[in-house]
Amino acid sequence: MIDSNIAKVFIVPGHPHILLAKEKSKYWQSLYDSYAEARKELEKTDADLILYYSTQWLSVIGYLFQADPNPEWVHVDQNWHDLGSIPYNFKVDSSFASFYAKEVKELGHNVKCINYKGFPIDTGTIVAQKLLNPNNKYPASMVSCNMYAEKDESISIGKAGFEALKKANKKAIVVLVSSLSNRYEIKDIDPENDKISSAKDNEWNLKILELLSEGRLEDVSQCTREFSKQANADMGGKGIWWLSGISGETNNFEGKVFDYQPVWGTGAAIVSLTPTKNKEEDIIYEIDQNLKKTSPVFVETVNVIKNITSDNKNDNDTLFSKKAPEPVGAYSHSRKVGNLLFLAGLGPRKRGSKEIPGVTLDENNKIVAYDIEIQTRSVIENIKTVLEESGSSFEKIIDVQVFLTDMEKDFKKFNAVYAEYFAKTSPTRTTICINSLPTPIAVEFKIIAEI
């Protein structure tokens, strides 16, 4: 648990479109409006300053710290200059810059406190500061993102920031300015038809947002390498690692997702994390590059966060089945998004029963023996149940993800049973081997279907 030196954490996008061109796209307008909601939450805190880490303020050697107490200039984004200029006049806590720089220098890095007129502040920090702190209610502090830093270094720079807050006796609102997926469209687009660059990026963004909505920042940090590889995470996820370091490498937060929208193909989300007391269960799982060690939360589902990504935002989009196995976490059985239906991960368990079809357990609830064929059939029957309750059907499945705990032993038998049910419809499928599942089972499916 982090102490009182951090009041609240925010993750926000830094695209100039949100500030300068919101009227051109309903998605950018939505983010602008959600920034306003986040600002209301921010202004309820009793923080002494806002500490920004932007993936757009890049340094090559060491780290830079903004120490000009009143930076004033007119900024034009180098990539989006056609959107116009942004005049700014900020209030900066230059004394805290010295505290932070000293902590980072003691780690052996080159540091420099910048204090001269006209030194450029990056677009991301300007956008976030303009939308979160427009009247300079809180003095700001800004640290650069070293473009060559890896995980351990980024976490250590975050930890140094926390030590600086303690030594300066300051309470901070910590703001990471970063996209989720960062794959821009390379051709001109109609802003009203903006979308996430690929379905794969979108799916990964939703997985990350699900974890953040549950306050599981450290779990996000642990899977950032894979996220970056699969969805081109902004600056390789350096910002998430920094955020994890300054926040105590913990999952002890209450999470809130304000919004998630595309900005020129990238995934832009506004999220807040409020420090809490230790949760009853705060187990951190590390995901390796083959996804063979994984958090149950990560593989259970790609739940869509409430009130985002869909114009259809009523509770009827979410199903808590009365027939399917009871959830083992804070998730629904299915959620509708447009004409798509996303199912949470389903295993062979049956509702209201401690016995699992095809599984024999000892007195310690450990697997003694199991039949993968029986389990696979039971999983598929559970899928049919949830699909029908959700207004879809088995024939409308378009994508299947399968998790097996023993690929070498079980794949052939599983695959034969699978073919009995799916041979005619032939949805796309991905089969992944993992170390374990949340309950003592050997197989789990995750489904996307049409409605």
Image (cartoon, rainbow, N blue to C red):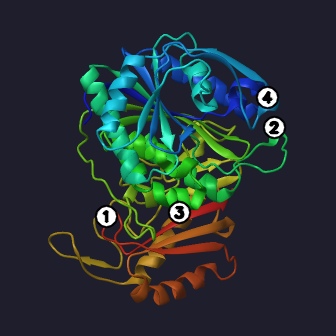
Amino acid carrying label 2: it is Glu
Residue depth check, mark 3 versus mark 4: number of the one nearer the observer: 4
Read off the residue under disc 2: 192
Tell me the residue at 31%/39% (across/down): 159
Residue 274 percent location from the top left of the image? 37, 30
Q: Nearer the viewer, residue 101 or 161?
A: 101
Looking at the picture, which amino acid does disc 1 mark?
Ser
SS at badge 1: loop
Reading the image, the residue beneath label 1 is 353
Q: Amino acid at mark 4?
A: Leu
Rounded to the nearest angstrom, the CA distance separating label 4 from label 2 is 16 Å
Mark nearer the viewer, 2 or 3 = 2
The amino acid pointed to by label 3 is Thr
Q: Residue at x 42, y 87 (%)?
A: 408
N-terminal-most mark, 1 or 4? 4
Please tell me the numbered disc located at residue 83: 4
> Mark 1 and mark 3: span between their CA atoms?
16 Å
Q: Residue at x 64, y 64 (%)?
A: 393
Q: Closer to the N terminus: mark 4 or mark 2?
A: 4
In terms of sequence position, does the residue under pointer 1 or pointer 2 come before the other?
2
Circle 3 SS class: helix
How far apart are labels 3 and 4 at the CA level?
50 Å
- As displayed, is residue 246 above or below residue 186? above
Q: Which residue is mark 3?
A: 385
Instruction: Name the residue located 27 percent from the left edge and 47 percent from the top edge.
Output: 282
Label 4 SS: helix
- Name the foreground residue: 276 vs 330: 276
